[in-house]
Amino acid sequence: MSTAVESRTIDTLLLEERRYPPPPEFAAEANAKPDIYSRSFEDFWETEGRERVTWFEPFTKLLEWELPYAKWYLGGKLNVCFNCVDRHVAAGNGDKVAYYWEGEPEGDRRELTFADLQREVVRFANALRKLGVRKGTAVAIYMGMVPELAVAMLACTRLGAPHTVVFGGFSAESLAGRMNDMGCELLITQDEGWRAGKPVPLKLNADEALASSPSVKQTIVLRRTGGGVSMQEGRDRWWDEVIDGEPDDAESCPCEPMESEDLLYLLYTSGTTAKPKGIVHTTAGYLVGVAATHHYIFDVKPDSVYWCAADIGWVTGHSYIVYGPLCNGTTGIIYEGVPNYPDPERWWEIVERYRPDILYTAPTAIRSHMKWGAEHAQKHDLSSLRLLGTVGEPINPEAWVWYREHIGGDRTPVVDTWWQTETGMILITPLPGVTTLKPGSATRPFPGVDAAVVDDKGNEVGPGAGGYLVLKRPWPAMLRGIYQDDERYRETYWSRFEDVYFAGDGARVDEDGDFWLLGRVDDVMNVSGHRISTIEVESALVDHPEVAEAAVCGRKDERTGQAIVGYVSLVGGREGSLEKLEELRNHVGKKIGPIAKPANIVFTPELPKTRSGKIMRRLLRDVAENRELGDTTTLADPTVVEEIKQRAATGKAEE
Ligand code: PRX
């Protein structure tokens, strides 16, 4: 962990003395009561497993733990779509709204009840079946935030077909890489998406990806914008045409009974190499984990309207827009576009219109709203809000307090929830109604979760000391590995310390036992709550024919948490230019996706290297954050970093 970053973070935390005990009225009605923490690990997960989910056949064994692989709820049979849709309709809640959907273009709205959702899912599942999708067929989904994205995911789970959802902001190459890794046979996409008033060319990207994804034989294309796209005869079919004439009654397409440990989905995430990891999530433990956490942490009530403003393409959307909330029969909001389209009031209009009582978003979004000004929120009635949540990166206390005051009317609890694509569910979090909140702290491990902070040697540190976050026991929604890469799974999560899961985050525990997350300790950057590996961006830069060498690091950014800084040497020692900088940024955008574009690129004839030729990223981070340089004695040529410092100071070209 960089000591400068750590000490600065710790300074902030030491000064943070604000405390927010649970309001008594909230506590009296809360789903979680203080005694929840005294439930034993086994009792907690047994009970949640039985109560939160409907089983076709009950499980007979809670957990089998053969380090580093866990199996949960063995012997059980269930179906995720049945739990998220059918059982609510069967219980008489068919008329309850499952999703309020708001498109980005103004006035574009839809309301889907659970009965509507069931009909749409069944028709689409029938169509998929006709195209040959069966239990085990791998399906890729590359869409924007439209209700059909949830419909597609649920239809897959109904058939027992594992999916991989690829975020619509990823490039053709990223999409192809994921489809090839999983061996997808069918792709579900749409003509275009809407983002900030402009169409996003999803089908066009998909066409490019399909050219290098030989396993994908068929696609289904939803018409969203009506923009012109090319359709390949025999391969591409329109969504409305494939569902035309398909029956929509549940019996026409029964939910496939799945084993607890059957594959539910893969979701790819960045690690410390250029190749994204296919994180494996299975059926029962995942569903129990997301439903239980959603119930207690968001304190959802039968009449709640819950808004998670993430994108379904990330794990937050999988667990807390689709699977957790639907399993709990909760009414949700899906918004298609960006928060400031057509202006920064958009979110607050949405709150006023649908009156959610719960809002869950990322610190980067909160900081954007802070920048745009509280006046936009003040123009709207936000009194429906009862609880706020954040996820994705450490939240600075100022943003936490602003969120509570300006959005939460200085009355709502704010739950800062720590988790990862790998963990599947929230693991460290306050429980509203129970926990005394501290701005900037994710507070406690969720009941049935065993977390600790350890030093370099793996020994637990005492109160106040910093170290590495580890998990000492398995949890139901944990990853079941990296797809087809046992070695990388063991190496990434289980080799750093003996017998515990290494999360890759720095943390500290204070005197009260509350956890404070301090950011990544590896070569993974966190930009607007999204994980991007330095090596992925470096590979994309070096892929450009004029780039000889590249090194990338993150630097602190007020709005996005971290921003990407690239250091590039051009072939033949050529000098860079503003045009070259733009060209390289666009190259990275094309290779990975716009979120991975470096905010700044410093051109330099040499990169700082050790005598053995290793690039010293630590020094580049110091330069990027304008810090005093750390130890430079191991550099092969100490003058190099001085030169880079000069260039960084003069050649800035930021967005
Ligand atoms: O560094 C932590 C940060 O996000 C990483 C996980 O990223 P991803 O898999 O993309 O999932 C994000 C949404 C679950 C973590 O290793 N992170 C996430 N939540 C928090 C956080 N850091 C501090 N506080 C949080 N609440």
Image: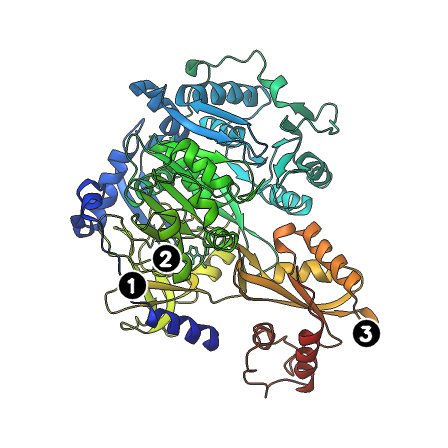
**In the rendered structure, which amino acid carries the disc numbered 3?**
Gly
Kindly indicate whether the residue at mark 2 contacts the one at mark 1 (C-beta within 8 angstroms): yes
Q: Nearer the viewer, residue 503 or 72?
A: 503
249 is higher (above) or lower (below) than 603:
above
Mark 1 → mark 2, Cα distance in angstroms:
9 Å
Give the number of the disc on residue 401: 2
**In the rendered structure, which amino acid carries the disc numbered 2?**
Val
Instruction: Specify which label sits upstream in the sequence, 2 or 3.
Output: 2
What residue is rendered at 67% in x and 83% in y? 642
Q: Nearer the viewer, residue 310 or 448?
A: 310
Q: Position of residue 648 (x, y in %)?
A: 67, 74
- Mark 2 within 8 Å of ligand 1, using the beta carbon: no
Mark 1 → mark 3, Cα distance in angstroms:
53 Å
Helix, strand or loop under label 2: helix
What residue is rendered at 33% in x and 51% in y? 414
Helix, strand or loop under label 1: loop
Instruction: Specify which label sits upstream in the sequence, 1 or 2.
Output: 1
**In the rendered structure, which amino acid carries the disc numbered 1?**
Arg
Quadrant into which the C terminus falls: bottom right
605 is higher (above) or lower (below) than 555:
below
